[in-house]
Amino acid sequence: MNIGSVILACTLFAAASSGGSKMGLSAKPPCRSGFSQNFYIVIVPKVVLHSQNLLKVKFEDCQHSREVGFVSSDPNFSVRPDGAVYAEQEFGNISEPIQFMVTARELFDPHIWETTVKLAPAGHPHPLPLTKADIEEMLSRVLDSQPRVIKFPRKHQRSSYGNGLRRQKRDWVIPPINVPENSRGPFPHMLVRIRSDQDKDVGIRYSITGAGADQPPSGIYNIDPISGNMFVTQPLDREERASFHLRAHAVDMNGNQVENPIDLYIYVIDMNDNRPEFKNQVYNGSVAEGSKPGSSVMQVTASDSDDSTTANGMVRYRILSQTPHSPIPNMFTINSETGDIVTVAAGLDREKVSQYTIIVQATDMEGNLNFGLSNTATALISITDINDNPPELTVRTFSGEVPENKLNVVVANLTVVDRDQPHSPNWNAVYRIVSGDPSGHFTIRTNPITNEGMLTVIKPVDFEMNRAFMLTVVVSNQAHLASGIQSSLQSTAGVTISVQDVNEPPVFSVNPKMIRFEEGVPAGTTLTVFSAQDPDHFVHQIVRYSKLSDPANWLRINRTNGQITTMALLDRESMYVKNNVYEATFLAFDNGKSGSPQASGTGTLQIYLIDVNDNAPVLIPKEAQVCQRARLSSRINITASDADSDPNVGPFGFELLSHPPSLRYNWTISRLSGDHAQLRLKIPYLEAGVYEIPITVSDSGNPQRSNRSLIRIKVCPCDENGDCSATGAVAAAGLGTGAIIAILICIIVLLSMVLLFVVWMKRRENEKQAKPLLIDPEDDVRDNILKYDEEGGGEEDQDYDLSQLQQPETLDHIINKPAGVRRVDERPIIPESQYPVRPSLPHPGDIGDFIHDGLRAADNDPTAPPYDSLLVFDYEGNGSTAGSVSSLNSTSSGDQDYDYLNDWGPRFKKLADLYGGGDDD
């Protein structure tokens, strides 16, 4: 049998399959997206050219609007958009079958479809013949979509011809194994049996590998190594994993491979076990009022985790309810497949219904309510406003009144009604004055809260000019009216405004008023008449004048006619004159109307003062310093200044006086510029000292004015740099009275400090002599106690009885006291010890014996303080366990070790030397 036989067998198989489908199905099955076959087989030549088409896989796209992309798992082969599989490179000799996966995926769809493609090389030039058994086996594999027994392909088979040739057994694709999800078992459940034809000759051990067997998720599938029975061990969930790719292996008892591994593809069959889930439980949409039927509102979307290529995952939508039912219960409809909600009727009016609530249901199984699973969501549809209601003024005529000469006064409030969305452009009112105000005295501002129009004065009105205004006002919205909506007649109204007469102040006709005069005008000179007029023409009033501001008090105004006269000399150089102008302010006031107070107005008079040459020039600086030798720094630059202005200032003339004669002999002056001159020594040397140089300076005015100025010059010896030395400066300048006083004060302060220091040292020396130290200060290890002051305890400290410190004459108070606790200051009632009496003239050798005898007597004397009694701070009863510490032996036993005093630092060094028993002992 040749390639034609194979093609014929495949054709018969296809015809049988087609005929079976026609006989078994009376109706056309529903469209399901996916590959037309789970696997494709094609016999190809051994030599394949680059870009050569090998086969074409068919993909059914039920939507017909989505783009499908194909991907090959083998990089040596690719798939064109039409499903044609071609070679990416040239193959010179294909000797083994090639198998790979083709994956299809639609754009923006996470679902993936897969099919298997197997390329079998054909014999060249003479293909290997196929036996009848081969064709039967091939047909059995193709027809059986889920074989119960899967055999490993035989590697070689001896030909029935006698030439001894061996041919290779063609390898057929193993059909995928379909396993339904959510199976209830029992588990493990047998799927197929894997066996090898060689199990009769040798012992075979079977195994499976791959994800689901020995790789995560492991343990889902296992195989009996002896029988080859393959099992699934637990329910499967297609939503977690839709397919598995395993490989079956057959080895002998020694682990040697007996058969080539075969690929097993397991597909999980979907069950309708998931409800559609909306992305949101509440959806918000909007549509404009007055929208036409078919206007898009919003879209709701639900997804189903089941297979979207089957009815299990095909979701359909419908509207369950609408609230409210105005104007009809079915104002909206929904596209059952896309979830788009649109309007189906006219009559949406925001002013009647501003929001609709829609309950949407999503059902899988293509919307079959008997078998499908459902879920619901809420869609809130807001009706947006359009400007379909023009604003309407509440009355036809408004009225108001305003005083004359007032600004920013609200004359009237224009009220309006608009049923559109408040505080939106469709509601906000815009007012316009269309007639009655040609001069622009008024404007209308909109109150943003109430939408009222506030008619406001922006330009003062004059009662004498206009006693009333008749305005025409039109109101509209910020947004234009919707198409087909006409303006209302009530959008126009009239406004009547009455102007109130008030007492207006007098007004200066020229304000400010500028006049020009030369400075130096004498007192009593009439400058001008500064008068004002009363604007109230209908009432005759008398105007009076007064002075409001006159900084220099130079002017006087006539109370009745406003005539301005001078009271003092006008001086342009005065501090009150700025830029040659002097300003004064005057007040004009009337006598007031009946029932109205007086009204006053102000006017400013500006007097421009023309300069005259009334100031002599002066020289600066007043003092200077030069060196006594002309070759060093012996020149002084001087400057002339004049309070007048051009032409009564420079250029200035500088001249030394002729008297005394030595002045011009020692000094000379020369002009540098119009305002500057230089004074310098004329002789080579001048004695150090202070010289006063008189210089005459004159200006260029007419008439000319001159001034004699003195410059105080200090002549001093200088160093080589031309700087005046300190001794020379003192010698030249001399000491003034202030310097002498300062020096005397410093001397007195220094003498006082020396005197205080001597007194303090004397007092300290006296204190040392009055209280000498017992030991050398260097050997004093006591802590220094600084005694600052001692004060008594106040009045209580002054009230004490000295008799309590004296020896009592009798001991009755002690004898009669009961036994028990005794005070520490009470003397015991026992005979006193007899102390030895020192002879009047003791022998020097007896001094030591006398001291020891006295010490022995004191140790044995119980009456000597401290008395042999308990030291009680607070008596709480008898039976104290504390012993007495008052009878300590005052003699030293010599057993005490005082060497530790050496470790206490330098302050205890003296004690360590006295009691430590060191080398001195």
Image (spheres, rainbow, N blue to C red):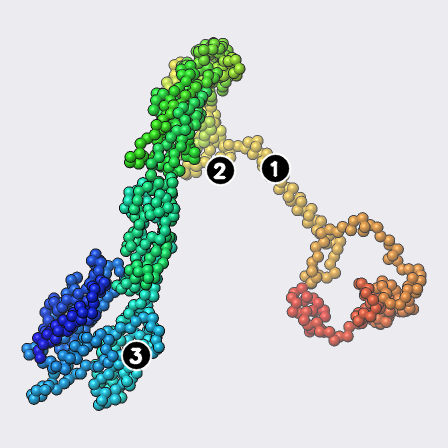
For marks 3 and 1, give the one nearer the viewer.
Answer: 3
Asked if labels 1 and 3 touch by Cβ distance under 8 angstroms, the answer is no
Q: Which residue is mark 2?
A: 726
For marks 2 and 1, give the one nearer the viewer.
Answer: 1
Q: Residues within 10 Å of mark 1 (few under 14, many from 20)?
A: few
Q: Earlier in the sequence, mark 2 or mark 1?
A: 2
Asked if labels 2 and 3 touch by Cβ distance under 8 angstroms, the answer is no
**Relative to 101, 343 lies left or right:** right
Estimate the x, y position of residue 723 in percent, counting from the top left.
43, 37
Give the amino acid type for the residue marked by disc 1 in the picture.
Answer: Ile
State which quadrant residue 153 falls in.
bottom left
Q: Earlier in the sequence, mark 3 or mark 1?
A: 3
Q: Residues within 10 Å of mark 2 (few under 14, many from 20)?
A: few
Q: Which mark is residue 190?
A: 3
Q: Earlier in the sequence, mark 3 or mark 2?
A: 3
Total residue callouts: 3
* Placement of 498 over or under 111, stated as above or below: above
* Placement of 895 over or under 226, stated as above or below: above
For the point 31% across and 32% down, the residue is 486
Q: Residues within 10 Å of mark 3 (few under 14, many from 20)?
A: some
Task: Tell me the quarter of the image containing the C terminus.
Answer: bottom right
Q: Is label 2 in a helix, a strand or a loop?
A: helix
Q: Which mark is residue 745?
A: 1
**Relative to 627, 361 lies left or right:** left
Front one among 640 and 588: 588
Task: Tell me the quarter of the image containing the N terminus.
Answer: bottom left
Asked if labels 1 and 2 touch by Cβ distance under 8 angstroms, the answer is no
